[in-house]
């Protein structure tokens, strides 16, 4: 539960882990049409780590991220982010927690075209009812290389620049954990590298925790470790991933998936 009995305590202090899932399951639909997207996933990620999540299409990667970020609720199991249990609280508590502690980056940016770069970036602060400091806006946009684009609209930017705005928006609340679902999926190699370096810096320089879904072994090699998913279950882990080693493991995951079919 939120705050486990001491909900008004401002900060429970350092948590031993950034993310913990215990036997998390998510089933979409019912009866004949039921799909087990996540099947009893248990994992722990330490603070200040950068983890990639990989696996075949439909293996449950996005579902895992959505459940871990409090954007979706598992049917069973426990999710703890930064020491706070997400499962079990009210919708309002969950929303408040998510806005303060969690950042999310989507493949398709999810920027509002009617707002400027600066306005998009500070939207999470506005939604949380916080005062918006112009200096802070400029600082966070400068950190993603867009300090000179504050007044532009998203449709005046390249894909890579748009994704950097989305990252600035995810960083502006100084969240403990940042979830990114295929953040480089729509980008060319050069733009992808820029985005991956930003995520890496969020971990190395600012001590945040990043969990990133990707299909790309090159993108995964920026992470400290890769978790492999198959059929809604964890199917392995690789520390210190290299693009070649990741591609090799993915190929074997594919073999496993077709075994017995
Ligand atoms: N809202 C939904 N309603 C019904 N089934 C869903 C829903 N969302 C996901 N699923 C199913 O759950 C399973 C896992 O989906 P998920 O989107 O998590 O996979 P993924 O690993 O992210 O795939 P991809 O690599 O294609 O993005 C799939 O079989 C999918 O069809
Ligand atoms: Mg997905």
Image (tube, rainbow, N blue to C red):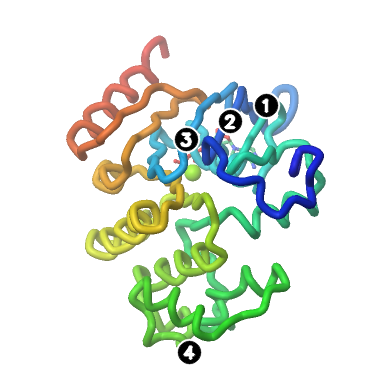
User: Which residue is label 2 attached to?
Assistant: 21
Q: Going by the image, does 106 lie left or right of 13?
A: left
State the image quarter where residue 199 is shown: bottom left
* In this picture, residue 22 sits left or right of residue 156: right
Secondary structure state at the residue bearing disc 1? strand
Nearer the N terminus, badge 1 or badge 2?
A: 2
Element type where label 4 sits in the image = loop
Residues at discs 1 and 4 in contact (Cβ within 8 Å):
no
What is the residue that sits farthest to the left in this orientation?
A: 244
> Closer to us: mark 1 or mark 3?
3
Q: Rounded to the nearest whole Å, what is the CA distance between mark 1 and mark 3? A: 16 Å
**Residue 217 in the image: x percent, y percent?**
27, 41
How far apart are labels 1 and 4 at the CA level? Answer: 44 Å
Residue 216 in view = yes
Quadrant assignment, res 83: top right
Identify the residue under disc 3.
45
Chain-order first, disc 4 or disc 2: 2
Instruction: Report the residue marked by disc 1.
Output: 77
Tell me the mark number nearer the camera, choosing from 3 and 4.
3
| Residues at marks 1 and 2 touching, judged by CB atoms closer than 8 Å | yes
Q: Residues within 10 Å of mark 2 (few under 14, many from 20)?
A: many
Q: Earlier in the sequence, mark 3 or mark 4?
A: 3
Marks 3 and 2, how far apart in space? 9 Å
Query: Which of the two residues, 97 or 155, is positioned nearer the viewer here?
Result: 97
SS for dot 2: strand
Please tell me whether mark 4 or mark 2 is closer to you in this view: 2
Instruction: Say which residue label 4 marks.
Output: 151
**Secondary-structure class at tag 3:** strand
* Quadrant in which residue 88 is drawn: top right
């Amino acid at each position: 539960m939120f705050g486990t009995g001491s909900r008004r305590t401002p900060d429970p202090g350092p948590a031993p882990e950034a993310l913990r899932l215990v036997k998390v399951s998510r089933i979409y639909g019912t009866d004949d049409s039921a799909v087990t997207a996540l099947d009893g996933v248990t994992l722990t990620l330490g603070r200040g780590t950068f983890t990639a999540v990989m696996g075949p299409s439909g293996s449950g990667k996005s579902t895992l991220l959505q459940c871990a970020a409090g954007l979706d609720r598992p049917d069973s199991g426990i999710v703890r982010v930064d020491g706070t249990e997400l499962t079990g609280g009210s919708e309002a508590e969950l929303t408040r927690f998510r806005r303060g502690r969690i950042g999310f980056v989507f493949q398709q940016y999810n920027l509002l075209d009617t707002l400027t770069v600066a306005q998009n970036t500070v939207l999470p602060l506005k939604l949380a009812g916080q005062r918006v400091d112009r200096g802070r806006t400029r600082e966070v946009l400068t950190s993603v290389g867009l300090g000179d684009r504050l007044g532009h609209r998203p449709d005046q930017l390249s894909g890579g620049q748009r994704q950097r705005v989305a990252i600035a928006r995810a960083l502006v609340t100084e969240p403990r954990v940042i979830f990114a679902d295929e953040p480089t999926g729509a980008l060319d190699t050069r733009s992808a590298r820029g985005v991956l370096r930003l995520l890496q810096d969020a971990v190395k320089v600012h001590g945040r925790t990043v969990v990133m879904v990707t299909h790309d072994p090159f993108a995964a090699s920026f992470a400290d470790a890769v978790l492999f998913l198959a059929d809604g279950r964890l199917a392995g882990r690789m520390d210190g991933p290299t693009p070649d080693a990741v591609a090799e493991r993915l190929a074997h995951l594919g073999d496993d998936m077709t075994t017995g079919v």
